[in-house]
Amino acid sequence: MSSLNAKIQHVFNEPACEKNQGKDVKARKKGCSKPLTPGAAAGGCAFDGAKIVLQPITDVAHLIHAPLACEGNSWDNRGTASSGPTLWRTSFTTDLTELDVVMGQGERKLFKAIREIKEAYAPPAIFVYSTCVTALIGDDIEAVCKRATEKFGLPVVPINAPGFVGSKNLGNKLAGEALLDHVIGTVEPDDAGPYDINILGEFNLSGEFWLVKPLLDRLGIRVRACIPGDARYLDIASAHRARAAMMVCSTALINLARKMEERWNIPFFEGSFYGITDTSEALRQIAGLLVKKGADPELLERTEALIAEEEAIAWKKLAAYRPRLQGKRVLLNTGGVKSWSLVHALMEIGIEIVGTSVKKSTVEDKERVKQILKDENHMFEQMAPRELYAMLSEHKAAIMLSGGRTQFIALKAKIPWLDINQERQHPYAGYDGMVELVRQIDLAIHNPIWRQVREPAPWDCYPAVKDELPSTKSGTATVHAFKKFAGTTADDFGEC
């Protein structure tokens, strides 16, 4: 546990975080930790955060060392997509019982589970996750993993991020540290080239990275490793030979990007594939970094030609939606890279942003929002459900874009809602993804169901029906009265 505490303090002291570096030495040593308030784990614990970052590595067996409830249901629980292996979607757990805990059988059961997975599935690696129960009883998963690696001849990687140590975001970073300590740099590729890049913090939700990868392929740029979306273990193990990197979600893996730059001289930038302008800028920056690292300068010209071609196609498709969405007001209740990239993307087609959540955003994310919106009043750190409902019910927004947790607030306010978090069904990255996002917003806003659900109920509009119903205890006369008015329409009583 002492080594874990040291690792947590090391993660909190993040030089790439401007907010952290703005503190004095004493405050910096305390890190970013603060006492958790009741219910703080509702957004996910450290174990959840580590599993979110690592589970999309598709050919790895993910083994949860815990009682059964800690694993839950892994099948499609994040909406990430794989172009090949499906092993990552299978649940593996040691299923500790009370008897195992009391009798101290945890480590022995873990070793046995590793052997069974190796014999039945022969994966290239096994990731073993520590949890609250196994960390509290003192199971040494690092020792077990080391012994299993020697015994079975395959990498068995300990992920030491039990839920009680902190938030989901801390778990994201601890997962990045595990990759640095045990995976990245362990395999030397025989095909390294000047056009290799890493994409960090991209989860391939709904397969949206597959809308971006063809653009890179056309430029001759190879994605050495996309961490973690649709990744393979050997790709990540050889990721240290990439020439440049793009950071998509710095909130999760900024420590991974910085340390890879320090250890292997892989420069990185933070960008977004949401929106036409941001996608184009990301392609330019990738090409620029590769040229600085030795790629042929003609890559810059080919990149500009590709951007011009793709932008022309995308704007032509979006032209049909602009008159229907011009001036429509949108409320964004998300965080991270979406807090600024989606703002920019939607404003490009004339949509007005009435507010965006920055609860899960970095200092840099918030600065980008300020520059784009030019009004801090449109940023909110956290908005209670009651306040969200009040804003929507007063029709200050035509639609809300958020995750599934707040969808019912919008539905109760009779306002269209669109999922943009991990549960979404449509990919929104790249040029084609932007067109799809706008199409889905248009479909949601102009869905005729909203006009219908906003209409008052007949018993609120037509008092004549209520007044003419005879009073009776038996209810028979009431039934006949309703039958009498069953064929009436709004024209019979006038408008509400």
Image (cartoon, rainbow, N blue to C red):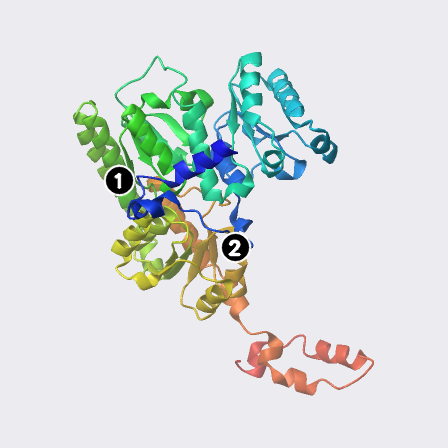
Task: Left or right? Give the position of 437 relative to 164.
Answer: left
Residue carrying label 1: 280
Q: Quadrant of residue 131?
A: top right
Identify which amino acid the numbered label 2 is placed on: Thr
Q: Relative to 19, say whether 379 is above or below.
A: below
Label 2 neighbourhood size at 10 Å, few (<14), some (14-19), many (20+)?
A: few
| Alpha carbon separation for disc pair 1 and 2 | 41 Å
Query: Residue at position x 53%, y 34% from top?
Result: 1
Where disc 2 sits, the SS reads loop
Q: Nearer the viewer, residue 352 or 354?
A: 354
Point out which mark residue 37 bears. 2
Q: Can I make out residue 423 in this image?
A: yes
Label 2 near label 1: C-beta < 8 Å? no
Q: Nearer the viewer, residue 339 or 417?
A: 339
Where disc 1 sits, the SS reads helix
Query: Residue at position x 25%, y 21% from top?
Result: 194
Q: Nearer the viewer, residue 486 or 446?
A: 446
The image position of residue 333, as x and y in percent, is 43, 55
Q: Quadrant of residue 490?
A: bottom right
Q: Earlier in the sequence, mark 1 or mark 2?
A: 2
The image position of residue 404, as x and y in percent, is 52, 51
